[in-house]
Image (tube, helix red, strand yellow):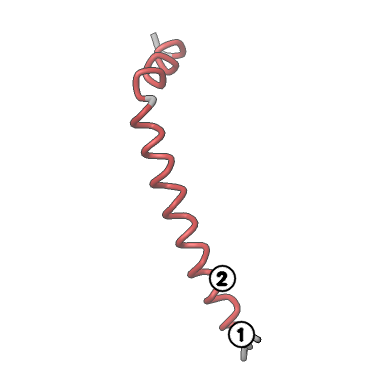
Amino acid sequence: MTYIKHKRYRTRKDIVLSFYKKFKVVLWFMLIALSILAWMYRVSLTDYLKTYFY
């Protein structure tokens, strides 16, 4: 059998800090993914913006 360690939070601050760390990782991943997508589709994005500002 495997042993699973359960994380026990001591205070509300510990819960908030662990959530903030995970949220930062997700936010950075989303920013990197969006920048890669924007670079891949840069021609279509500029054409799309030019339809509004011509």
Nearest the camera: 24 or 2? 2
**Residue for badge 1:** 7
Q: CA distance from mark 2 to mark 1?
A: 13 Å
Location of residue 1 by image quarter: bottom right
Q: Is 6 drawn above or below residue 50 in the view shown? A: below
Checking the image for residue 54, the label placed there is none
Question: How far across and how far down the image is residue 49, in percent?
Answer: 42, 18
Residue 40 shown left or right of residue 52 in the figure: left
Q: Position of residue 2 (x, y in %)?
A: 62, 85
Within-10-Å neighbours for mark 1: few <14, some 14–19, many 20+: few
Indicate the secondary structure of the residue bearing disc 2. Answer: helix
Image vertical order of residue 52 relative to residue 40, above or below: above
Q: Position of residue 25 (x, y in %)?
A: 45, 61
Residue 26 drawn above or below residue 32:
below
Residue drawn at (41%, 34%), measured in percent from left and top?
Answer: 37
The residue that appears at 37% across and 39% down in the rendered structure is 35
Asked which secondary structure carries label 1, the reply is loop
Residue carrying label 2 = 19
Dot 2: within a 10 Å radius of its alpha carbon, few (fewer than 14), some, or many (20 or more) residues?
few
Where residue 16 sits in the image (x, y, percent)? 58, 75
